[in-house]
Amino acid sequence: MVELGAQPRHRERKDRERDQREQREPHVDPAHQRDGHHERDERVREVHDARPEEVPDRVEVDDGAYTYDARGRYYFDTGRPKEAAADLAKAVAKETRDGDYTRFFLFLARARNGERAAAAAELERCVTRLGFKGAMIHGHTQGSFLDEAKYRVIFECAEGLDVPIYLHPTLAHPDAMKSYFAGYEELARAGWGFAIDTSCHFLRLVFSGLFDAHPRLRIILGHLGEGLPFAMHRLNDHTARAAARRGLKKQPIEYLRDNLLVTTSGNWYEPAFLCTLLALGADSILFAVDWPYEANATAIEFLEKISISDADREKIAHGNAERILRM
């Protein structure tokens, strides 16, 4: 899950709840963990097994938008998966409206990019009828990237609804997995490969002319922009002429400033954050966690301690999400 615009609870209450939780949960010896996967897997299992009323106390936020992690649906054959995706969206919407948990669970619809027209129709239904806040797409679909013309219907729909698309990492294209990561599979995922694949995917959208065709479309990238804020100036210096030859109306760096939003999810490094802040501005950054794969306590502590003004902290903590997602 990615929590967007989550508002931290009062520190005293949060500390008390964390102490109570630590008393209930067994200690995991770091020697038995492998690159943090054991701890993350345990958190995922806890969320899966939890009753709905238990989850809000676990996440330590007052409000936020959440995503549902079900990447496997992208790779099913056509037919029943379309109905299954609709059933899932309906169940999620009902679950988040029943009881007192609506403020904790404002889910993002997940557009299945394998069936373009159906995905666009499902996105419109989820936003207009179920109150969802946008769409999340997990990268390429079996090697097919979103810059292909056949996917434009999804982006046209999102722009018309004025909702963002969250481009989430996935494993790199099979050819890249073979050529770059064979024998070094530990580099293929969150530590490195996810960022490379997702940033390249976003740049393909830029250079395809997507944002000239849909100038009000906003794409969200996690992890402080998957490295793009650090590289955007050099990128622009070395590709601006090529972009003009392609017929793009603006320089590449302008699309990053105008059409890109980033979240803090899972990247708790202040120098990287300050680079992102200087490159994109506080209005383009949303607080997010990547829970349960990342710890909410770590994310909240990071937000509270980074060296920024109180006004920018408020924007990033919740103000930008309230404005962009109309929460």
Image (cartoon, rainbow, N blue to C red):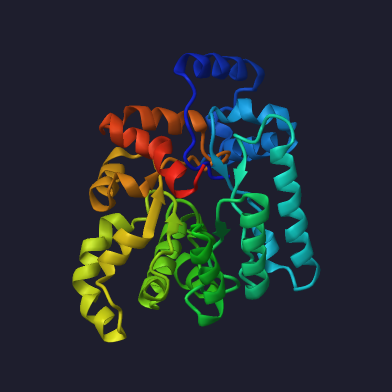
Whether residue 77 appears in this view of the structure is: yes
Q: Residue at the location (67% across, 51% down)?
A: 130
Whether residue 182 appears in this view of the structure is: no
Q: Position of residue 270 (x, y in %)?
A: 30, 38
Q: Position of residue 308 (x, y in %)?
A: 26, 33
Relative side of 83 to 215, left or right: right
Count of residue discs:
0
* Residue 276 against residue 100 in the figure, above or below: below
Relative side of 138 to 256, left or right: right
Q: Tell me the quarter of the image containing the N terminus.
A: top right
Q: Position of residue 125 (x, y in %)?
A: 67, 60
Nearer to us in this view, 299 or 162 = 162
Furthest-left residue in view? Answer: 237
* Residue 271 against residue 60 in the figure, above or below: below
Nearer to us in this view, 241 or 35 = 241
Q: Residue at the location (43% across, 60% down)?
A: 218
Q: Position of residue 220 (x, y in %)?
A: 44, 56
Q: Residue at the location (42% across, 49% down)?
A: 223
**Residue 47 found in image quarter:** top right
Relative side of 179 to 107, left or right: left
* Residue 256 against residue 273 in the figure, above or below: below
Q: Residue at the location (25% across, 47% down)?
A: 275
